[in-house]
Amino acid sequence: MIVVDTNVIYSALRSSLGASYILLDSISEGKVDYAVSAALVFEYEDVLKRPSNGLVFTDFEIDEFLDSIISLSHRFSPYFLWRPFLKDRKDDMVLELATVSNSEFIVTFNIKDFTGSKNLGVTAITPYEFIRKEKLL
């Protein structure tokens, strides 16, 4: 099981050429178990619908994408908080989801933001490192 940070979702929607896109494609094919929470989906929505984000999708298309992500995921509701554990409360929310879902990895471009996550049994890993490790290339 993995948790995917918002920056990876954003990257996958920006380009179909990178590791983020391969990861999302692998999730849609059922090759990767993926955890979400309501809070994480709301964060995805907030970032993906910002007018200044450079994406070429309408709000309706973003909603359809998010519905698809939710349908492919395992949904969790963290019932405890580790806060403050990391520097950013939004990163704490991602770590809490990873912990409650027994995820081995948080897939993110911001590895340094999850310093200390290994103390809770969760490794922060880039999309490229993850797809190489899982042989998804």
Image (cartoon, rainbow, N blue to C red):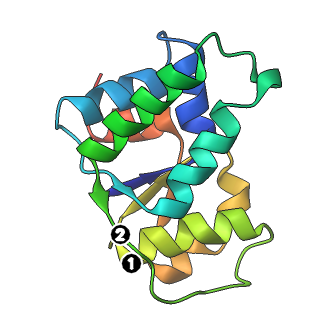
Q: Residues within 10 Å of mark 2 (few under 14, many from 20)?
A: some
Q: Residue at x 18, y 29 (%)?
A: 29
Q: Which residue is identified by label 1?
A: 100
Quadrant assignment for the N terminus: bottom left
Camera-side residue of 60 and 52: 60
**Residue 113 location (% of width, % of height):** 72, 59
Q: Is residue 98 visible?
A: yes
Give the spatial CA distance, label 1 vs label 2: 7 Å
Callout 1: helix, strand or loop? Answer: helix
Up the image or down, 3 lies above or below 97; here it is above
Q: Can you tell which mark lies on residue 137?
A: none
Image label count: 2
**Residue 82 location (% of width, % of height):** 61, 87
Q: CB atoms at circles 1 and 2 under 8 Å apart?
A: yes
Q: Residue at x 25, y 31 (%)?
A: 28
Q: Which residue is identified by label 2?
A: 76
The reply, left or right, for residue 38 in relation to residue 48 is left
Going by the numbered disc 2, the residue's amino acid type is: Phe
Camera-side residue of 10 and 75: 75
**Residue 48 location (% of width, % of height):** 64, 32
- Quadrant position of residue 91: bottom right
**Residue 23 location (% of width, % of height):** 37, 31
Going by the numbered disc 1, the residue's amino acid type is: Val
Up the image or down, 89 lies above or below 136; here it is below
Up the image or down, 6 lies above or below 49; here it is below
Give the residue furthest to the front. Answer: 60
